Amino acid sequence: MQDYIDFARKNGFKLLDIGKCQFCGAKTKRGIHECLEIFNLEFYSIDFSISENHIYRFLIVDSHALQHPEIHGRWNNHFHLSRLHLIFKHNIKWTYKLSPKLSDYLNIYKLHKRDEYLTPPEVLKRGNITTTDIKEKLTNETECKDLIERWSLEVHNVWSNHHEVAENIAQGFLNKNKKHL
Ligand SMILES: [Zn+2]
């Protein structure tokens, strides 16, 4: 858990431990720490052992990471935005097997794009849906899944300045992995 505090410090952000989440605006009482707790613990009330539910896990991880890039490494943005792009724009049925293949592709991509930096949307302008909204819906699985999908579509949309990059990565990834898809 120390990692995210270190990342924030390196990115010049002081983490606030009171009130709403300073990054996504979630209606928390203990700021980003509570936002992360909801993300890490509470979303597990969805049964992720069922393969049809895996997609919601990917959408949750990508949406949360892209709403909180200050607490991650900068290349995570490439990964999460490209994955959402592949899911929404290329209708790829994402599976656990594909994630390491996308990481492998990005490792090669990075070598040629060392200076490429995806500037995140301003804090609190990263979509209206947040962890606390999802938490409120956890008792109704259908509504919850629907909201997770809307959450990730919104987040994908607010990163539209970098959709061209995501599209390039998606194309490269698809070319390289044709036989697995
Ligand atoms: Zn948050």
Image (cartoon, rainbow, N blue to C red):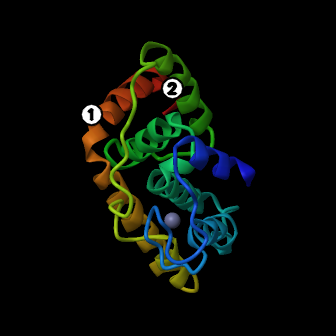
Kindly identify the amino acid type of the residue bearing the numbered disc 1: Glu
Say above or below: 145 vs 170: below
Q: CA distance from mark 2 to mark 1?
A: 15 Å
Q: Residue placed at 30% from the left, 38% from the top?
A: 162
Residue 106 image label? 2
Answer left or right for 165 relative to 65.
left
Which residue is at a point 39% across and 25% down the rendered structure image? 116
Q: Which element carries disc 2, helix, strand or loop?
A: helix
Q: How many marks?
A: 2
Residues 160 and 28: in front is 28
Location of residue 119 in the rendering, given as x and y in whole percent from the top left corner: 36, 40
* Residue 95 picture location, percent across and down: 57, 45
In the depicted structure, whether residue 58 falls above or below residue 109: below
Q: Earlier in the sequence, mark 2 or mark 1?
A: 2
> What label does residue 164 carry, if any?
1
- Is 5 on the left-hand or right-hand side of 81? right
Dividing the picture into quarters, in which one does residue 141 lie? bottom right
- Residue at the right extreme? 2
Within 10 angstroms of label 2, few (less than 14), some, or many (20 or more) residues? many
102 relative to 142, above or below: above
| Quadrant that contains the N terminus | bottom right
Residue type marked 2: Leu
Q: Secondary structure at mark 1?
A: helix
Q: Using the image as rendered, state which of residue 161 and residue 138 is in the foreground.
A: 161
Q: Residue 150: x percent and y percent?
A: 37, 67
The x and y percentages for residue 133 are 47, 78
Residue 46 horizontal side relative to residue 130, left or right: right
Name the outermost residue toward the top: 112
* Tag of residue 153: none
Crowd class of label 1 (few under 14; some 14 to 19; many from 20; radius 10 Å)? few
